[in-house]
Image (cartoon, helix red, strand yellow):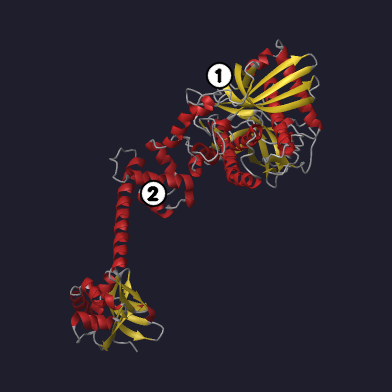
Amino acid sequence: MNQGKIVEYIEQGKFLCTLCLQDNGNKLHLLTSKNREVNLSPKRAVLISGSTYDTSKPREDLIERLRHTEQRRTTLTNQVNVKELSELVRDEGESFDNKYLAQLVFGESITDDHESALMRALFGDHLYFKMKDGRFQANSEEQIDLILRQREEQALRQEKLEQGSNWLRAIKDGRTPEDPPFKQDIISLLIQLAVYGVDAPDLKYGKDLLAEAGIADILEARNILVKLGIWEEDEHIELIRLGVQNSFTQDQLRESAGLAEKEISLNRREDLRELHAFTIDGPLTRDYDDAVSMEIDGEFLHLGIHISDVSALILPGTILDHEAASRASSHYFPRGEIPMLPPDLSEGNLSLKQGYDRRAISLLARLDRSGNILDYRFVRSLIRVQRRLTYDEVNESLTTDELFQEMHEMSQRMRHKRMNQGGLNLSLPDVQVKFNSDSSISLELSDQNTPSRIIISELMILYNSLAATFCRDNQIPILFRTQKEPSETFPLEGEGQVYYVFRQRRKLRPLHIDTTPGSHSILGLDLYTHATSPIRRYLDLVIQRQMSGFLTGTGPVYNKKELEEIRMSVEPVIKDLGRVKRDRLRYWIIKFLSQHPGEIYKALVIDELRSKYRLVMDDFFIVAEIKRRGGIMLRPGEKIFVTVKKADPWNDILELAYADKESTTVV
């Protein structure tokens, strides 16, 4: 029984000295020196004295006894040199009970007070001893050094927390405080929170920092970064999350500069500089990787499709090759772009610029006036682009230029033939984001079915299709692009192209990239690959290397196993960045909508769900949802009018409400 004994336990890191008034076996009823009575599990007792005291004495006497005991033990604790004690027993490598250690400090004749003092001293400083199963063992010098470093780091962390929270609080209140010494560390932590949210590696520390500054929501980290000028209001955090670099290292630029100055010569190439080659691109294009030429010869057409020979400069295993593989492709966003190769190459020596000799891998084909291919060949060539044209310029010249008319008719026949072979036209206009001088946004639709775009689209499809056939027939290992027939095919009916495209896309089979040839049903082709954008797409460069190796007689660069390894490395990056591009366009569309409150828009019902409808906004091709409205039933394909209740691009929130088309102007 422990009644009448001094019982010590730890509460909130402090030793409490108490007197046991009653022990019922499962619970100790204790009296504290502050005249409080508490119940304690015996398991929590750190030290129970051997001597007992008469608990029947007056309460004042009991409390006075406790106070004197506490004072003696505190005084004795100050006499314990924990460091010296540790050095004394460290080499023995054993664990010791508190009584033995107390005797080493105070001598053979010890009391409960001495044992308590020893326990208090060891518990007060965990640097020199560790406790296990009620016994103490001295820490090694290495362990002590580690603990000291951890304490220093914790102290520094706490200092950063205090200074950082004060700094953030001042910023939140609109003041301009002096920058703390740890400003960059704090900014790095804020970026972590803004980019990764609850998945941030230092989430707890970040939450503590913001909480100390009076900020409850970790998403506020983004607003702070904007306020500090570290981020723009529309910072592209997904690229930060993926670690995409928008610049090149000094080593990469040095290699690029050397290649950019490399002399261009005929060097075992077919001289095609006399052909009237021209480019057709957008007005802002700077990296031209394809050019075309065509001559009308009676009943025959002599067609040339010329692709920049990037493989001649970017060799496998080089610094730029590794960087291009890691980027996978050039990335174009509404505000800015990230090229796969440095601009002095992609816009210089590799770009099929007007008036300059350039290396190319050219497809030379002879067709009849019905568009049937009579013969074709691929050659390593030297070309010189004669004209740089835009899509609009070609469209405007169509009625007066016989060559463009013939190219348009030929490309339409090519498309019609593909459609008859099961191909599907699932194109929609591109949404172009324009940034105005007053910080507002404009959205424009770019028609992908204009004559000039059909010409280039069909000629690139032809090049890729014949490249796949050429490689298969010559047993050149490449990566084919295959896609099985849709699980279901719909006719284009009265609901229009937008509804048809969104409906049909859901029934498409996955696209596969592998070394096994197969059909591409959506294009209506037996074989297909990608080889027309080696400046902008890494896998196109890989295919071009295979073709060039065959044409020079040196043989393919890669075998099938190596091609598969490249695909496995590059394809996930392509998918990630494709998603990022779609999400970023959605961001800007939602931002546009946030700048036009009260406007009314046309929308198309594409799904009927349990409590809502899924819509696509006609003019932006952005998908959103709207709650069902009582008494009104809508069907997929039906058009309605909506207005925007809430548009938050940062959090991808787009809430729509029904609108009366008579109430205001329909956008």
Q: Which residue is mark 2?
A: 210
Q: Position of residue 160 (x, y in %)?
A: 31, 50
Q: Position of residue 115 (x, y in %)?
A: 25, 81
Quarter of the image that includes the N terminus: bottom left
Query: Looking at the picture, which amino acid does disc 2 mark?
Result: Leu
Label at residue 356: 1
Query: Is residue 597 among the parts visible in the rendering?
Result: no
Could you say which is closer to the camera, residue 163 or residue 85? 85
Query: Looking at the picture, which amino acid does disc 1 mark?
Result: Tyr
Up the image or down, 358 lies above or below 129; here it is: above
Quarter of the image that includes the C terminus: top right
Instruction: Of the two numbered discs 2 and 1 on the same chain, state the one appearing first in sequence.
Output: 2
Q: Is residue 443 left or right of residue 145?
A: right
Q: Quadrant of residue 172?
A: top left
Could you say which is closer to the camera, residue 333 or residue 178? 333
Q: Quadrant of residue 266?
A: top right
